[in-house]
Image: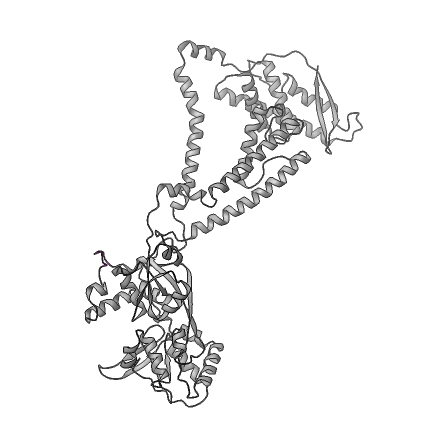
């Protein structure tokens, strides 16, 4: 005959009653179902008589915890075994033995937290939070050092163009190379890929080291930013029990775990309460403590509203006063909101849960064997699934942060940064011409109109030579080469013209460069024709390049501002280069 006792405490053990005063009709729940399934492993007839008494009045008067009182009743032989969430503590183990643990309770620090609004300063600083100020200074310093190194290499050896987009004639100029190098360095930092060319051993070494630096920096930034974006942001000064201890907060704990907490955290200021461990909520609202140590099950019951209902029931039954129950309002008169009480930090304590059993009745060994065998057979998981509907459901609203979704504030900082830089770029582009136009006098405007003519024939020849070099020797598309050459010539000669005129001139030059590139490609396809210039058809190449060095372009209607130039001849020769192809050199005379 086996006389177990159990206490209603869903979802693990519950009791259903009939008419008032009658004995219980049924016992159910995860732990009750599992215990009955475990007894079936013994393969023997067992007279199971469930007791409707959780603990005797004598034991309840002796111990502040009803669970400890029930363990004492098992120890003195009133019950054979107790089925419930019994924490295996040092005090209880000294009373009676326990069966193998069926699960463990994890304890967390809980306190009042709120998902409040984010300040503007916080929003702006979000993109830079993955690194500290010193780390950002180091990143900027290394990037600047690389920019200066590549500038020095480009200026020192102007024949090797180590900067992407650098004009050949600008390779030896510090004031032109340095800004471009700085831009490429920081553009590489943002993109994660070095934009420097590697024409020499020195630049290749710089490239490899900088690429490795970018790899480490961007990987670290991405990992830290991702973890910061998905972590729940709460307004509280407490991140764990150590913070609560440092701030001298009173910490509520149930009397059953007082010994363990004092042993782990001797400096903690504790408020020890008796009775049900779920009383921590009303003590928090009453201001008896600012935080509490409690296990996951009670936190789930808290957010399901069960603990509040229990306190209100105790108030209704006049077991508690209104000031003790805190049923509807807290000590400040604000509506009681259990959803503001949340766990912070990591688990601080883990206590196994097991059933106490009476010693000296030859029950320990067979019941321990049955419990272990049932666990190995997966009967605990089966009992959990069968009673899944009994688990509490949170009534607290699910915030965007709890779902793991990112808020608009998470991207507001970088969006504001981009918008600010873009606005500054637009101001730099439009404000100076507008100011200049607004401050000019009538005679200056007339003089500008008189000088707003297309470039002279000599200027246009320089333009075409430069564009041809870019198109043929550096594999730059004709349209891009034409615009780059035009901008360079316009800066050099300060040639002014209207937008329509500029676009027309660039378009015509791009068409000519296309014909030149095609002619050179055709000549290159006929390589190996036993010519003296290394394989090129000098006649075809010469004719093509002559178009670029003289005014005899391929357009049938040249702009009227371009005067017909004198005859110019071009000597074309192939000069061996370091690569597999030849370089076409121009020698106008």
Which residue: 41% across, 31% down? 423
Q: Is residue 49 above or below residue 552?
A: below
Q: Is residue 251 above or below residue 178?
A: below
Residue 480 visible in rendering: yes
| Place of residue 280 in the rendered image (x, y in percent of width and height, measured from the top left) | 30, 65
Which residue: 61% across, 12% down? 564
| Quadrant assignment, res 26 | bottom left
Residue closer to the observer: 235 or 8: 235
Q: What is the magenta segment's predominant secondary structure?
A: loop
| Place of residue 63 in the rendered image (x, y in percent of width and height, measured from the top left) | 31, 76
| Place of residue 301 in the rendered image (x, y in percent of width and height, measured from the top left) | 32, 66
| Quadrant assignment, res 249 | bottom left
Q: Report if residue 332 lies within the magenta region.
A: yes
Residue 41 visible in rendering: no
Q: Report if residue 150 lies within the magenta region.
A: no
Magenta-colored span: 328-335
In-image side of 94 versus 339 (left or right): right
Q: Is residue 89 above or below residue 515?
A: below
Residue closer to the observer: 226 or 513: 226
Residue closer to the observer: 464 or 512: 464
């Amino acid at each position: 005959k086996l006389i177990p006792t159990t206490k209603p405490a869903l979802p693990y053990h519950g009791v259903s009653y009939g008419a008032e005063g009658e004995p219980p009709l049924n016992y159910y729940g995860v732990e009750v179902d599992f215990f009955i399934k475990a007894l079936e492993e013994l393969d023997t007839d067992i007279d199971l008589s469930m007791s409707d008494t959780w603990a005797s009045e004598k034991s309840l008067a002796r111990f502040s915890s009803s669970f400890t009182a029930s363990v004492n009743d098992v120890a003195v032989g009133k019950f054979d075994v107790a089925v419930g969430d019994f924490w295996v503590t040092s005090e209880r183990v000294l009373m009676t033995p326990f069966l193998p643990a069926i699960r463990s309770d994890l304890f967390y620090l809980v306190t009042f937290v709120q998902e409040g609004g984010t300040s503007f300063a916080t929003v702006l600083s979000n993109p830079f939070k993955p690194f500290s100020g010193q780390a950002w200074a180091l990143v900027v310093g290394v990037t600047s050092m690389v920019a200066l190194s590549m500038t020095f290499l480009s200026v020192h050896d102007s024949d090797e163009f180590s900067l992407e987009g650098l004009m050949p004639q600008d390779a030896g100029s510090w004031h032109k190379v340095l800004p471009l190098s700085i831009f490429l360095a920081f553009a590489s930092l943002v993109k994660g890929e070095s934009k420097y060319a590697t024409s020499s051993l020195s630049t290749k070494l710089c490239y490899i080291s900088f690429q490795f630096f970018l790899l480490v920096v961007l990987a670290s930034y991405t990992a830290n930013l991702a973890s910061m974006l998905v972590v729940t942001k709460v307004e509280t000064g407490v991140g764990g029990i150590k913070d609560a201890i440092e701030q001298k907060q009173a910490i509520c704990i149930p009397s059953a775990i007082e010994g363990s907490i004092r042993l782990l955290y001797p400096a903690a200021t504790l408020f020890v309460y008796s009775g049900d461990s779920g009383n921590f909520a009303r003590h928090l609202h009453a201001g008896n403590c600012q935080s509490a140590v409690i296990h996951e099950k009670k936190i789930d019951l808290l957010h399901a509203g069960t603990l509040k209902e229990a306190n209100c029931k105790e108030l209704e039954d006049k077991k508690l006063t209104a000031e003790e129950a805190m049923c509807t309002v807290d000590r400040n008169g604000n509506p009681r909101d259990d959803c503001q009480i949340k766990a912070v930090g990591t688990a601080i304590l883990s206590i196994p849960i097991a059933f106490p059993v009476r010693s000296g009745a030859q029950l320990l060994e067979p019941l321990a064997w049955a419990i272990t065998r049932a666990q190995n057979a997966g009967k605990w998981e089966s009992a959990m699934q069968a009673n899944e509907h009994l688990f509490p459901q949170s009534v607290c609203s699910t915030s965007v942060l709890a779902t793991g979704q990112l808020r608009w504030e998470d991207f507001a900082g970088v969006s504001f940064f981009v918008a600010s830089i873009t606005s500054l770029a637009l101001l730099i582009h439009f404000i100076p011409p507008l100011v200049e136009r607004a401050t000019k006098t009538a005679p200056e405007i007339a003089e500008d109109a008189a000088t707003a003519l297309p470039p002279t024939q000599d200027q246009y020849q320089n333009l075409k030579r430069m564009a041809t070099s870019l198109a043929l020797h550096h594999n730059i598309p004709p349209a891009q080469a034409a615009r780059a050459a035009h901008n360079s010539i316009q800066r050099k000669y300060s040639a002014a013209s209207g937008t329509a005129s500029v676009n027309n001139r660039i378009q015509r030059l791009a068409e000519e460069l296309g014909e030149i590139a095609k002619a050179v490609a055709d000549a290159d396809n006929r390589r190996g024709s036993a010519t003296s210039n290394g394989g090129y058809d000098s006649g075809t190449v010469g004719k093509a390049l002559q178009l670029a060095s003289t005014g005899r372009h391929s357009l049938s209607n040249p702009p009227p501002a371009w005067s017909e130039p004198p005859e110019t001849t071009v000597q074309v020769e192939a000069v061996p280069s370091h690569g597999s192809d030849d370089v076409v050199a121009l020698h106008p005379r």
